Image (cartoon, coloured by chain):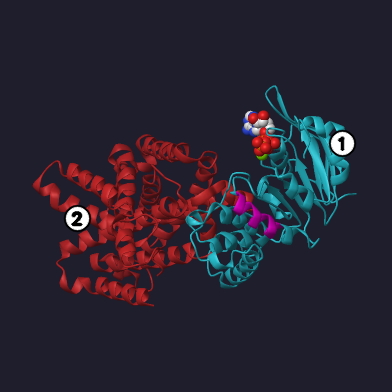
Amino acid sequence: MAFLELDGLTRRFGALVAVDQVSMRVEQGEVRAVIGPNGAGKSTLFNLINGVLPASEGEVRFDGRRLNGLSAFEICQLGMSRTFQITALFPEMTARDNARLAAQARLGGRWRPFGGGAVFAEAERRADAALERLGLGHVAGEVAGYLSHGDQRLLEVAMALAQRPRLMLLDEPTQGLSVEETGKAVETLTELLSDGKLTVLLVEHDMEVVFRLAQRITVLHRGAVIADGTPDEVKADANVQSAYLGGFE
Amino acid sequence: MRGWIILLAVVVVLAAAPLGLPLFMMTLLTEALILGLMAMSLDLMVGYTRLVSFGHAAAYGLGAYSAGYILLHSDTPVLFAVFIAAAMTGIVAIAAAWVFTLATGVSFAMLTLAFAQLLYAIAFQWQQVTGGSDGLAGIPRRGGPFGFDLLTSKIGYYYLVLLCLFGAYLFCRTLVNSPFGAVLRGIRENENKTRALGYNTRAYKIGVVAIAYALGGLAGALYAPFAGFTNTELLFWLFSGQALIMVIVGGAGTLIGPILGAALFLLAQHQLSSVTETWAIYFGLMFIAVVLFLPEGIWGTLMQRLGRKTQRV
Ligand SMILES: Nc1ncnc2c1ncn2[C@@H]1O[C@H](COP(=O)(O)OP(=O)(O)OP(=O)(O)O)[C@@H](O)[C@H]1O
Ligand SMILES: [Mg+2]
């Protein structure tokens, strides 16, 4: 039994089949890229996995547990954290408070209506460690809404990391970054993902980044999986070549 | 630290007020503190969670009618009656909030209004319990054992109100600075993200609504034996709107600001209504001016000027 298993996962929006019979196995410690052209259904697939959207058909099993019918917050509590393609954070809080609130969610006293010194201290410790790993230590005290777009993207990853997740879903962490910012972000992410401790599902458009970071790649096209394998296998795949019209190089 | 000293000074001054003020001023001050408690309770929802309510009169009215009924139909001392009424309001609010939180944004606000209007209609119709259009009259400030008899005098009752407001303020301050309060701020800024981070945001919202209504109910419960009567105006939408204005004028998300806003409102009503019948228009103009020129409200702006983003007493 794999760590994350998708079986025949399908999501329809009216007549449109955004995700079509997707099955996938992800092992613990694996960095798996999900790629595909715009509108292929990658973000929708993430929404099905972490419970933002209900599936029309099929099921998700996470560490042996069926997730159908659980809501997003319950799934997160099982140890699955995600970032969004469109940056989602708390713009009026500092970067540290953003990460702190993320870390607090996984602590026992997260709802305590009084006191909470110990909860805050532990959350802050985890938050600072996560910010440090994403190279955001020097902006921890800045208001998130005023950070550069690049730092905001990394802050969202830091928030996910501060939750000490067992599985991380990253939806295009370099989306909308300048060439310069992308370089820096990729470097930071490479460092984060290459220590082999995290299990990650990564959507990314930059093929160079994908081939560098992912051990396995799943290719979506019009909602369906058209290829699944190591970077070399995927590169050589004829279906993928034609889906991407002209291939990668 | 400086904040605590100022707070203590304010409480001491308020506690000494009966020594220097004539009795009619004490009556006005008591009412201001009661209204302040009402506005502060609403601030938990509006200022800290961005749950806008158009129906907070429901909390006040429910508390007032419950306390009035208890005092008229049993020999419960006033001290117990107000807390029982507050608890009842909070419990009813759990069920109401369960419904409110099916919606968000403006729809949420409309549901709070609908609930208040429902109570308003019930208060009119359910003659035996609510007294219908006459309301409940002759509500006693009953003393009781352990020297509670002190509470029956106007000054004694003023101290009860002052203690309730001070206690409620400390309670709210603790709440908003707790882990629970941090989640409320998350909901205020980005509810979807808060949920995605693993928080059951609906449960937190129901929680804060119940607390806000219980404290609003406490304010209403204190009002009934203070005024000696209740009527349906306490549940009217106009009062809900006024409470919202008190919060915004004083400064949403500051707790202190709404108390000031309430006091200012009452003062304006008292001073202007003797001069002109259209005093509400002048207060409305002031409201517009605050929204335009002091978007953080009076207290919020003051705190910002003093260089503190959020007041941390
Ligand atoms: N809530 C929705 N309602 C209707 N259609 C939707 C909804 N969400 C997504 N879609 C449609 O589903 C398809 C897949 O969208 P999705 O966002 O999953 O693609 P994607 O692979 O993430 O694309 P991109 O690379 O642009 O992010 C698109 O055609 C999109 O228009
Ligand atoms: Mg997408």
Residue tagged 1: A237
Left or right of A106 on screen, residue B207: left
Residue B301: where, in percent of width, then height? 31, 59
Residue visible at 16% across and 44% down?
Answer: B279
Do tags 1 and 2 sit on the same chain? no
Which class describes the residues within 10 Å of circle 2: few (<14), some (14-19), or many (20+)? some
Image hue for chain A: cyan
Whether residue B81 can be seen here = yes
Q: Position of residue B203 (x, y in %)?
A: 58, 50
User: What's the amino acid at mark 1?
Assistant: Asp
Of the 4 image quadrants, the one containing the N terminus of chain B is bottom left
Which residue has dot 2 on it? Answer: B267
For the record, the magenta segment spans A179-189
Q: Could you tell me how far apart the alpha carbons at marks 1 and 2 are, in whole angstroms?
A: 78 Å
Depth check: B154 or B204 in front? B204
A141 over B64 or under it: above or below: below
Residue B109 in the image, given as x and y percentages of width and height:
43, 40
Amino acid on which disc 2 is placed: Leu
Label 1 Cα crowd, 10 Å radius (few <14 / some 14-19 / many 20+): some
Residue sitting at x 79%, y 63%? A195
Query: What's the mark number on residue B137?
Result: none
Magenta stretch holds residue A188: yes
Q: Is residue B248 magenta?
A: no
Q: Chain of mark 1?
A: A
The residue drawn where x is 40% and y is 59% is: B81
* The image quadrant in which ligand 2 is located: top right
- Mark 1 element type: loop
Instruction: Give me the chain that's red.
Output: B
